Amino acid sequence: MDANTVDFIISSPGQTVRVGARIGELLRPGDLVCLHGDLGTGKTTLVQGMARGWGSPRAARSPSFLLVHEYKRADGMILFHLDAFRLRSGEFPGLEVEESLGRGAIVVEWPDRLSGFLPEDRVQVEMWWIDETRRNVRIESKGARSEEILRAFRKLAFGS
Ligand SMILES: Nc1ncnc2c1ncn2[C@@H]1O[C@H](COP(=O)(O)OP(=O)(O)OP(=O)(O)O)[C@@H](O)[C@H]1O
Ligand SMILES: [Mg+2]
């Protein structure tokens, strides 16, 4: 694996939450995380951990958009969680991306539904089902900022 990728196996939902928390604590306003993977692989479970790491485990529905949840932490910054599964390709995401990145970080499930709306520099997470409780996870950086996040994640999670 190269410097822009980490690959590992997760063996329980609790572990997925912990991995999510490690990612969440590294995020800053302006960051984007895209989650790929089939139905039920654990994307939303990972987001629960991300929200915890971000500093705000309680979700609120977006006042404006049905498919968006917001996790607002003490300093007012928001982790926007968008589940784009029900969007058709090319359809408006229901989220002002640039404006939201100024107010926090964004995590998107099913990001392919809105390619074109999202910046390139992103932490890309892919999850595959291995069996009932195990998932293969691959995290890739897609630009300078996401590379920084991945490097820090690697250190936090694996000490290297
Ligand atoms: N290692 C694991 N990591 C995450 N979830 C797991 C794991 N093992 C079992 N599960 C179970 O798999 C399910 C994952 O559901 P979750 O909603 O997180 O998936 P999802 O990828 O968001 O699905 P969707 O595409 O429908 O939004 C949960 O019921 C969870 O308990
Ligand atoms: Mg989900």
Image (cartoon, rainbow, N blue to C red):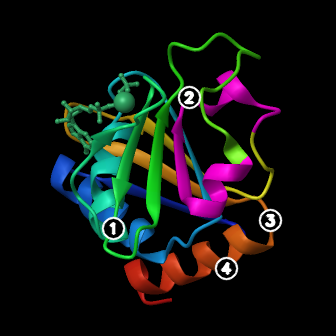
Residue plotted at (35% across, 43% down)? 135
Q: How busy is the neighbourhood of tag 4: few (under 14 within 10 Å), some, or many (20 plus)? A: some
Q: Is residue 106 magenta?
A: yes
Q: Amino acid at mark 1?
A: Arg
Q: Is residue 106 above or below residue 24?
A: above
Q: Nearer the viewer, residue 7 or 38?
A: 38
Q: Is residue 82 magenta?
A: no
Q: Are marks 2 and 4 in contact (CB under 8 Å)?
A: no
Give the left or right position of residue 103, taking residue 117 as reference.
left
Indicate the secondary structure of the residue bearing disc 1. Answer: loop
Residue plotted at (59% across, 72% down)? 150
- Front disc: 1 or 4: 1
Residue at label 2? 110
Q: CA distance from mark 2 to mark 4?
A: 23 Å
Residue at label 4? 148
- Range shown magenta: 98-117
Indicate the secondary structure of the residue bearing disc 4. Answer: helix
Across and down, in percent, residue 92 comes to 70, 21
Indicate the secondary structure of the residue bearing disc 3. Answer: loop
Residue at label 1? 73
Q: Amino acid at mark 3?
A: Gly
Q: Are marks 4 and 3 in contact (CB under 8 Å)?
A: no
